[in-house]
Every structure is written in C-alpha cells, then in structure tokens.
Image (spheres, rainbow, N blue to C red):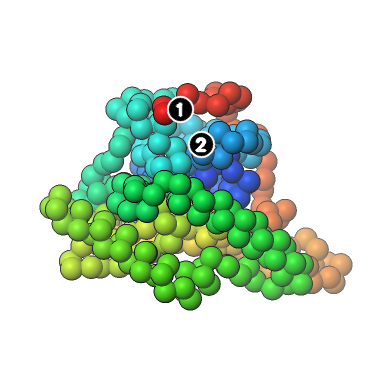
Amino acid sequence: MKLRYRTVFLSDLHLGSSGSRAKDISRLLKRIDCDTLYLVGDIIDMWRLRSKWNWPAEHNDVVRRVLKMVKKDTRVIYIPGNHDEGARQYAGLEFGGVELLIKDVHLTADGRRLLVTHGDQFDLVVKHHPLLSSLGGIAYEWLMALNRLYNVGRMRLGFRYWSLSKFIKLKVKRACTFISRFEETLVKEAERMGVEGVVCGHIHKAEHRVESGIEYFNCGDWVESCTLVVEHDDGQMEVLDGIELLQQIRDAKHRHQGKHPKHGKRAKHGKHAPVIAGAGDVLDDDDDDLEPVEVDIREPLPIAR
Ligand SMILES: [Mn+2]
C-alpha cells in the first residue's frame, strides 16, 4: 500500500539527536509515493552531533530511504535550517541527486506559488540571541526526555500519547506570542515576495491558516508531533498526522490479511495487547528493499563556522 501525493514537505527530523523519531520517519517514507519531497530544514542536527556523535542505524536508514526515493524519480530538495546551517554553504549543489537550496518557490498543481523556507531567518530570538536560543534548545531537550519517559509509562498502561510541549505551547502565553509573531513574519515575507503562501518548519508546530489572504503551512516536526504537509495531485494542501497515517496503513494491512485491526496476531491468545502508536512490531519492518549504504556518515560533516 502506497500513499500517493504530488508533494510532501517534512521538516525538523533532527537526525543525530536522541529525540528523533527516525524509525517512524523511515516507515512512513517507505509508504509514500510523491513527485517532489521537500526537506524543510533541521533534518540533520549538527548542533547535537557536534557535542556528541550519535548516528544509530535507524538514522542512517532515513538517509537511505530518501536516496532510494531519488532513485525512483522523486525530486528531493533539501533546504537547510539553523541546526544544519553548515549545509547552506553547498546551496546550488547536488548530493546523490538531492538538490540543496537556501529557499525555493513551489508551484502547486492549481497554480499557487508557495515560498519554502525553514524559517529560522525570521525568528528574532535565534537571529539576535543565539546563546539564549541554544539554552532554550537544551531545556527543550530535557523536557522532551522527561515527556518520553512519562509517555512510556502512559503507553504501558494503555493510554494515548500526551504531548507536554503541545500543552505548554497552549498554556503559556509568551510561547503563543512567540509563535504568532513567527507566523506573522513569514506571512509578511510571502506578501513581500508576491507569492500566495509559505511552507516552513522551525517552531515544531504543524499548522495551516490563512492570514490576510496568504496561506501559512508549518510542517511541524519528527521529534514529537510527527506531522507533515502534503500536496495532493489536484493541488489541495493538507497537514497530516504521521502517526495516524502509520496506524491507518497498519489497519489496512490487517484488514487485507483478514485480522482484526486492533489486536493483530496476539488476539488469538485472547490478550488485548494495546496497539502503541509508533510501535511497529505489526508493521512489515524489513528493510531488505533498501539500497546498500551509499552515504556512510562516520565522520562529522564539515561545518562552516
Ligand atoms: Mn530550526
């Protein structure tokens, strides 16, 4: 089963950091068939890699999955963000068929032009207070680690995933002001460029809204919310929950095999094992169809300082 889209926009995968949901990203990419894949920044977290080299096999699998899509004629455009800004110096070049660009204007099937940018250039905190933003980054990582622990407990008890940062973003007014200012600035930039909308990432908050006639899309992230923006073949754009998509694929697969979608193989023992979002033991996980490693990243990539 393949999910067919004209364009897929993913951002903030943060590969190389322990929080990255790399396995889920690979699972989803495996099921996607699209003409163009935009990687909208913070794909490889060079900030984290610089302080601690952490590149498990699952993170490499994402790279291999993307390269496989290139081989199958998907156009892949990588627009670096602030966590992979080292790659910006290679803008205009191509790596294994992946095009590197600072920003792009995407033309939808129904003729709308959308500015594609990571968005950190429009984040005043990152721009003027780099120390503050990296401290914020460390605090964020601690919070995420705490949130993961909490959710392991919740899932063992059969509860749904609960997002701490979503809660904070909803509750804390300052975070709201920050987010709305970011969104506003990007809408203004699209207006200035005379395009119909913008697709960005950076603030880890998936979104679609229309502000003064300009469409604002944010891809969210794959550290926590696991979201993506897609363009259907008719030009319709949509923000999707990646974990829900994976669940639908799983259910469809079980229906196909004539099993009850909720209980899978374990049902015959009469045990109601909870289906955990992201736990892919029921999903076909073999990576035999992956190409041999073409890019083996053992050494840190050169980083411009
Ligand atoms: Mn960013």
Residue 214 in sight here: yes
- Left or right: 16 with respect to 80? right
Between residue 291 and residue 141, name the one nearer to us.
141
Residue that mark 2 sits on:
46
Between residue 209 and residue 73, name the one nearer to us.
209
Q: Residue at x 47, y 24 (%)?
A: 302
Please tell me whether mark 2 sits on a helix, a strand or a loop: helix
Seen as rendered, the residue at the extreme right is 269
Residue that mark 1 sits on:
303
- Left or right: 297 with respect to 283? left
Q: Quadrant of residue 303?
A: top left
- Where 244 falls versus 18 (above or below)? below
Hey, what amino acid is under mark 1?
A: Ile
Please tell me whether mark 1 sits on a helix, a strand or a loop: loop
Q: Quadrant of residue 243?
A: bottom right
Residue 254 in sight here: no
Q: Separation of disc 1 and disc 2 at Cα?
A: 8 Å
Marks 1,2: beta carbons within 8 A = yes
Q: Which mark is residue 135?
A: none
Q: Residue at x 49, y 48 (%)?
A: 134
